[in-house]
Image (cartoon, helix red, strand yellow):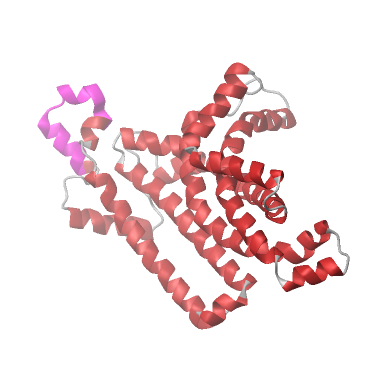
Amino acid sequence: MDTNLLFKKTCRLVITLFIILTVNFALPRLMPGDPVITMLGQEAAVISETDLGEIRSRHGLDKPLTEQYSAYWRSLSQGELGYSYHYRQPVTEIIRQHLTWTLILLCPVVALSSLLALLLGMAAGWKAGSALDKVITCGSLVIYSLPQFLMAMLLLTLFSFNLQLFPLGGLSSGSGGSALANAADTAWHLTLPLAALTLSAASAKLLVIRNSTVKHRCEDFVTYATVKGLSPCRILAVHLLRNACLPLLSLIALNIGFIVSGALVVEIVFSITGMGTLLYEAAVYRDYPLLQGCFLVLTIFVVVANTLADFAYCIADPRISHSS
């Protein structure tokens, strides 16, 4: 990759992260309500203004925004995200406990949705205009038009309430047993959340891959491979696959934010104790440090993943580097 291009993309990443971190500081403070009153709940009615002021001073909420902003950057430089008002624990420890389950959802979804979109998109593009193409295209459009929380609720209603094939939510039945039995039980609980996210994420990629396959199907190298007598499967796997993968790389980058936001909502629907549930509780309780920590981790994850996918696209297609 060109060194100049690498430098430009790295500078863009640094600027983006700076803006995100600044917005991350400002957003919780723009929310209505007093975090101290919310934290104390009904106890706030019997606490004097002097005591309330001491609590605000203890958490640094009585200081000017400029001082709070400086303290925010000092904490970040030391790797500290603060102390949660609601949980009364370090934010880093709380996020670490919840982030694991979100990553368990995200990583398989990125891989499965990409594989599903690649297989179905190339099949639909190779058979463009056929009944198979119409079924796949219409199905993906219907799924793409559904909000992810609605997709999750439909799967929950059908397979959990009506057919009773899967649990209603949570991560474990709590029955104990061996490590293998517990892993199988967790996988059983995560099947519907994974399905909801995978279907929603794959539908967006599928249409682009289908159109890319239709475009490249008529090019000379495909015609030459067909004249040589190669089977359609070999043409797709050997000749068309790389061309179809190029838009997939950029789609993965664009799709990661979509998957993360969907995972947060799906976690709430299925009562999974991941970052979605944690972010919701932090917003309800006006927990500034926890809100900032959640936004920080999620946005950095999305930005870094997009940057890595951007680099991968440049490596896979050198024309991008030369044109830049």
Question: Residue 180 falls in which quadrant of the image?
Answer: top right
Q: Is residue 167 left or right of residue 217?
A: left
Which quarter of the rendered picture does the N terminus lie within?
bottom right
Give the extent of the magenta segment: 39-57
The image position of residue 304, as x and y in percent, is 49, 60
Going by the image, does 217 lie left or right of 287? right
Q: Is residue 51 magenta?
A: yes
Task: Tell me which residue sits at (54%, 66%) in the image.
Answer: 310
User: Residue 20: in sight, yes or no?
Assistant: yes
Q: Residue furthest left?
A: 49
Q: Nearer the viewer, residue 218 or 84?
A: 218
Image position of 8 (left or right of 167):
left
* Residue shown at the point (46%, 32%) measured from the top left: 268
- Residue 45 position by quadrant: top left
Residue 186 position, x and y percent, is: 64, 31
Give the overall secondary structure of the magenta segment: helix
In the displayed structure, would residue 240 be above or below residue 9?
A: above
Q: Residue 26 location in percent, x, y?
A: 26, 51
